[in-house]
């Protein structure tokens, strides 16, 4: 027979185990979610990534943990970027100080001993961002469970923007900026992310990676040498006298204090019109990511339209309310899906973008257009924005073929009728 204390321990253990089973049944594997939320809300993203990675290795089919891990990895990507910027002397206080509340400046202090910022550092930062978002996307890509869910209160998520700084969350930022107004509503705003949102997030991660690859295809060295001193403390530049000028702008600054920053801005803008393309192969990698964005956008709607619940949906179907309180009609969905299909055809080279000079010359679109895919496959030697506006930069990529529906007035009229002036807002939301 068991001793009384041993029996009590066994009864307590059995009761606790039973409670965990019951709770997991009611909350759809809530234990994993609560653990992930705990890491997110305490700003312990690094610890959370390690813990959930270990948990997933022990249970490879646990898509609930996989979803949580992907979300945390995306948070880590943002945290890495902010800490890299701070470590290399990004001047939050000095550059944005005049328009920042004092308490806000305390959360984003300038680094006391910043490392030198140079072109190589910029490229490493962007590559780290690409690697981070690609890792998060790869994690989410392995999800197959149609019933996966993740409950989240975005305003409570904390991240550490500086190596030695305080955790920051959206609720705190808004409280500092706007006071206590509607703070409870912001804090309690919740989302239930599900299978469709897995593809939504994957699409945005692909888009972020595409932007990163596009940046790294170009050589920003000249721009950094000429203008980076405006937002970084210590920059590697042959024009060292730029670093010795008074770069502080505060509440007492007058118009004369803005002349030099304005001149520097004009110089940077001029250089940005024709940035050299140093690694053209990155254009194809960027194109792959753009196609990944579109494919996940298409797959997302299949899952969203199949949903029958209505639980704080990020993007609702026509039968759901949605957490944002914005109605989404079937006509909106159909029109947006056609837009994605047309964009996919452009990136595949099946449809051409109209050549605007033909339209101005003849008064109507011709059968000649620009093959965007060929621009990615064989990019020019530099960005040459002025020549693209003028038209001569497009010569190599002009051919006759099917012009995209985006040039059709009827299709554009339909988009306007469905979305009105909010098309780009819905586009950013829908992905």
Image (spheres, helix red, strand yellow):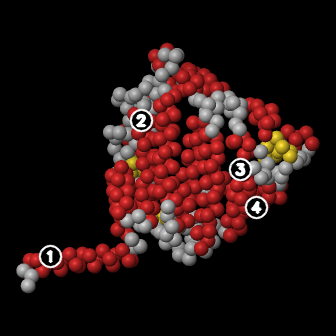
Left or right: 188 in relation to 199: left
Q: Nearer the viewer, residue 144 or 35?
A: 144
Q: Residues within 10 Å of mark 1 (few under 14, many from 20)?
A: few
Where is residue 219? Give x, y as percent.
59, 30
Instruction: Tell us which disc is closer to us: 3 or 2.
Output: 3
Instruction: Give the alpha-carbon distance from disc 3 to disc 2, as whole Å.
Output: 37 Å
Which disc is residue 417 wearing? 4
Res 50 visible: yes
Where is residue 241? Give x, y as percent.
49, 14
**Height in image: 227 above or below 326?**
above
> Which residue is rendered at x = 37% and y = 51% of the image?
45
Element type at marker 4? helix
Q: Are marks 1 and 3 in contact (CB under 8 Å)?
A: no
Left or right: 85 in relation to 383: left
Name the quadrant of the C terminus: bottom right
Q: Which residue is mark 3?
A: 347
Q: Nearer the viewer, residue 123 or 83?
A: 123
Q: Which residue is mark 1?
A: 9
Instruction: Give the alpha-carbon distance from disc 3 to disc 4, as whole Å.
Output: 26 Å
Where is residue 323? Give x, y as percent.
52, 65
Q: Residues within 10 Å of mark 4 (few under 14, many from 20)?
A: few
Instruction: Tell us which disc is closer to us: 4 or 2.
Output: 2
Q: Earlier in the sequence, mark 1 or mark 3?
A: 1
**Height in image: 27 above or below 206?**
below
Q: Residue furthest top?
A: 241
Which disc is residue 86 wearing? 2
**Height in image: 2 above or below 65?**
below
Q: Are marks 1 and 4 in contact (CB under 8 Å)?
A: no
Q: Earlier in the sequence, mark 3 or mark 2?
A: 2
Instruction: Give the alpha-carbon distance from disc 1 to disc 3, as whole Å.
Output: 64 Å
> Which residue is rendered at x = 77% and y = 45% of the image?
371
């Amino acid at each position: 027979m068991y001793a009384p204390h041993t029996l009590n321990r066994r009864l307590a253990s059995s009761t606790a185990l039973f409670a965990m089973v019951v709770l997991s049944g009611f909350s759809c594997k809530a234990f994993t979610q609560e653990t992930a939320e705990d890491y997110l809300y305490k700003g312990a993203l690094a610890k959370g990534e390690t813990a959930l990675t270990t948990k997933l290795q022990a249970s490879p089919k646990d898509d609930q943990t996989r979803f949580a891990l992907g979300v945390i990895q995306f948070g880590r990507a943002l945290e890495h970027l902010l800490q890299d910027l701070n470590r290399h002397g990004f001047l939050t206080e000095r550059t944005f100080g005049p328009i920042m509340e004092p308490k806000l400046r305390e959360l984003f202090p300038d680094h006391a001993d910043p490392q030198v910022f140079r072109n190589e550092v910029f490229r490493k930062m962007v590559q780290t961002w690409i690697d981070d978002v690609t890792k998060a996307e790869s994690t989410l890509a392995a999800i197959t469970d149609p019933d996966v869910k993740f409950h989240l209160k975005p305003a409570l998520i904390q991240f550490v923007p500086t190596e030695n700084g305080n955790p920051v969350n959206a609720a705190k930022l808004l409280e500092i900026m706007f006071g206590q107004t509607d703070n409870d509503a912001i804090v309690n705003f919740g989302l239930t992310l599900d299978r469709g949102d897995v593809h939504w997030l994957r699409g945005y991660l692909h888009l972020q990676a595409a932007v990163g690859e596009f940046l790294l295809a170009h050589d920003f060295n000249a721009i950094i040498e000429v203008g980076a001193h405006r937002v970084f403390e210590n920059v590697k530049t042959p024009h060292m006298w730029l670093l010795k000028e008074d770069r502080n702008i505060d509440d007492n600054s007058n118009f004369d204090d803005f002349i030099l920053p304005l001149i520097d801005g004009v110089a940077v803008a001029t250089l940005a019109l024709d940035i050299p393309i140093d690694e053209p192969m990155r254009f194809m990698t960027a194109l792959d990511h753009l196609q990944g964005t579109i494919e996940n956008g298409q797959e997302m709607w299949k899952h969203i339209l199949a949903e029958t619940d209505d639980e704080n949906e990020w993007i609702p179907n026509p039968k759901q309310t949605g957490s944002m309180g914005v109605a989404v009609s079937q006509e909106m969905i159909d029109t947006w899906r056609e837009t994605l299909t047309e964009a996919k055809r452009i990136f595949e080279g099946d449809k051409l973008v109209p050549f605007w000079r033909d339209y101005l010359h003849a008064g109507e679109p011709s059968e000649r257009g620009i093959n965007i895919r060929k621009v990615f496959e064989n990019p020019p030697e530099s960005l040459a924005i002025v020549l693209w506006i003028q038209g001569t930069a497009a010569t190599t990529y002009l051919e006759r073929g099917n012009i995209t529906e985006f040039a059709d007035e009827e299709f554009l009229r339909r988009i306007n009728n469905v979305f009105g002036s909010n098309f780009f807002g819905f586009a950013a939301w829908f992905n």
